[in-house]
Amino acid sequence: MDCRGPLLVLLLLVGPSPTQAQFPITNLNEQPEPMVREALATPYGRILTAQLAKSLTAAADPGCLSSNGITNDRLDERAGQLLQKWGTRTLETVLTMFDAKAYDKKFSASAGPRGAAELGRLRDDPTVKRYLALERPLRLATVLDFVVQQFDRYALLARIKIDGVSPFSTGKAELLRANPTEAIEAELEKFIAANQTSAFKRYLVLSKQASAALAGSLQQDKVLRTGPGTFFKGVEADLDAFCVDRRK
């Protein structure tokens, strides 16, 4: 199962406005570890963590758990640790696929040499700050979806004995309902329509240019070498510690 399809969609549809596109980083300076931590602390993140804990419990060998003193409570805790560790690695890997110098060059060409500084200043505008606050949970949900989808794909390819975590692989209605994406997108569309200050409109223009520059800085050769093991190869060692074996 090739993960390049969803990866290309995620990476090429970049943009600070989720009404235009979605990408799991605000910019190339976003730090993966705190972003993943923030995402896992959201209601959606806690629900996905609980789903992974259920999958670990169902897949783990009871005798192994007992002999190692691993209780269900500890599995819940370890599920969050696993998503934190491998989610961070996933975003770190995503960031390596961009050329920061190419981004700066392309953004300067479209927005002007002062475009980056202007975009930074506009983020302090009250209307822009409200917009970014509304938008942030959508970015975090995008991070979570990408991470758990890559985990599920790798687990399937590597024949790891564990059920899925992603709403899309499990098909569980409660997980699909928990995803805030559609509701937030609707709120953002309303916000944009109701707020047409000059500063906010200028922010959206610059953001669109930044999105195009970010997409243009993606190193296609690295994307084309991306496979199911790019993000989660080696997770078996952590799963072994949870008494989860590969399928026979």
Image (cartoon, rainbow, N blue to C red):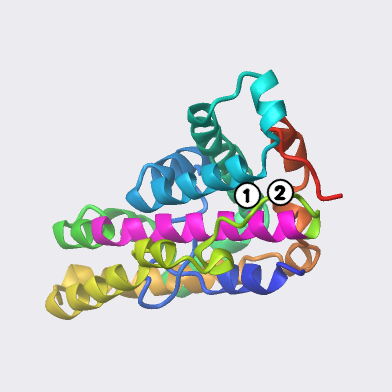
- Residue 203 visible? The answer is yes
Q: Which mark is residue 232?
A: 2
The residues colored magenta run: 133-156
* Marker disc for residue 155: none
Looking at the image, is mark 2 or mark 1 earlier in the sequence?
1
Q: In 3D space, how far apart are the residues under numbered discs 2 and 1 (Cα atoms)?
A: 8 Å
Q: Tell me the kind of residue under disc 1.
A: Thr
Asked whether residue 143 is drawn in magenta, I would say yes
Task: Look at the numbered disc 1 and give the secondary structure of its residue.
Answer: helix
Residues under numbered marks 2 and 1 in contact, where contact means CB atoms less than 8 Å apart:
yes
Q: Position of residue 162 (x, y in %)?
A: 68, 50
Closest to the observer, 162 or 186: 162
In the rendered image, the residue lying farthest to the right is 248
The extreme bottom residue here reads 193
Question: Residue at left 67%, top 19%?
Answer: 68
Give the residue drawn at x 72%, y 27%.
64
Crowd class of label 1 (few under 14; some 14 to 19; many from 20; radius 10 Å): many
Q: Name the side, left or right, on which 112 lies relative to 198.
A: right
Residue 147 vs residue 159: left or right?
left
